[in-house]
């Protein structure tokens, strides 16, 4: 469809109709950020990272905390898109797999030497639960492939996955 705002003898030019639709906003930058869900503050490192990209930290923190209040302090990733007019959009991601594994296995942190020191265990049902929650962000073609991705992350943290054959 062709659009034209010019007129020919006071009439619209044949074949052309009215004004063009609003153009999409021009994205100037995109960046990723991790913060505690529902409890983010503009203190470093979040505030300076936002300010460096021209985002108002107060507005961001308010929107982020509102969108993630149900996660109650769990670390959450987000993708921030900043537009030319300095407005922004936030796309909330699910928590990182390592954070979810630590919560499920009830451990403080992963092992420094995962091939020797095992710090916890997960069942395959727990691995499937994590894979289901992260399904849209994982690249596996099916549920089993996503579970293997999560099991690999768990293994690299020193967490034993019961019921999983190691290749």
Image: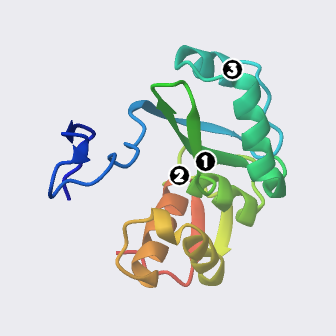
Q: Please state which of the two labelled residues, at mark 3 or mark 2, is closer to the viewer.
A: 3
Residue position marked by numbered label 3 in the rendering: 47
Which quadrant holds the C terminus?
Answer: bottom left
> Which of the two labelled residues, at mark 3 and mark 1, occupies the earlier sequence position?
3
Whether residues under marks 3 and 1 lie with C-beta atoms below 8 angstroms apart, the answer is no
Find residue 71 and report its horizontal and vertical position in percent: 79, 55
Q: Secondary structure at mark 1?
A: loop
User: Compared to 106, does 141 lie above or below?
Assistant: below
Q: Position of residue 66 (x, y in %)?
A: 80, 47
State if disc 1 and disc 2 touch (CB < 8 Å): yes
Q: Which residue corresponds to mark 1?
A: 111
Q: Whole-percent x and y of residue 16?
A: 20, 53
Disc 3 residue crowd, few under 14, some 14–19, many 20+, Cα 10 Å: some
Q: Which numbered mark, 3 or 1, is in the foreground of this view?
A: 3
Q: Nearer the viewer, residue 112 or 133?
A: 133
Image quarter hosting the N terminus: bottom left
On the picture, is 25 further left or further right than 123?
A: left
**Residue drawn 45% across and 25% down?**
84
Q: Residues within 10 Å of mark 2 (few under 14, many from 20)?
A: some
**First in sequence: mark 3 or mark 2?**
3
Q: Is residue 98 above or below residue 9?
A: below
Instruction: Return the residue at label 2.
Output: 114
Q: Are marks 3 and 2 in contact (CB under 8 Å)?
A: no
Query: Is 78 or 54 nearer to us in this picture?
Result: 54
How many numbered marks are there?
3
């Amino acid at each position: 469809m062709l659009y034209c705002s010019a007129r020919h003898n006071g009439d619209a030019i044949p074949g052309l109709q009215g004004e063009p639709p609003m153009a999409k906003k021009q994205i100037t930058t995109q960046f990723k950020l991790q913060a505690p869900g529902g409890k983010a503050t503009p203190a470093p490192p979040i505030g300076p990272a936002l300010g460096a990209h021209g985002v108002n930290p107060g507005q961001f923190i308010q929107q982020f905390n509102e969108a993630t209040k149900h996660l109650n302090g769990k670390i959450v990733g987000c993708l921030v898109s900043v537009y030319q007019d300095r407005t922004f959009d936030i796309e909330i991601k699910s928590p990182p797999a390592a954070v979810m594994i630590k919560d499920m296995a009830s451990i403080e942190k992963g092992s420094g030497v995962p091939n020797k020191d095992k710090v916890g265990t997960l069942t395959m049902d727990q691995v499937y639960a994590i894979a289901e929650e992260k399904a849209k962000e994982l690249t596996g073609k099916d549920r089993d492939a996503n579970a293997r991705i999560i099991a690999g992350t768990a293994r690299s943290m020193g967490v034993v996955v019961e019921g999983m054959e190691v290749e």
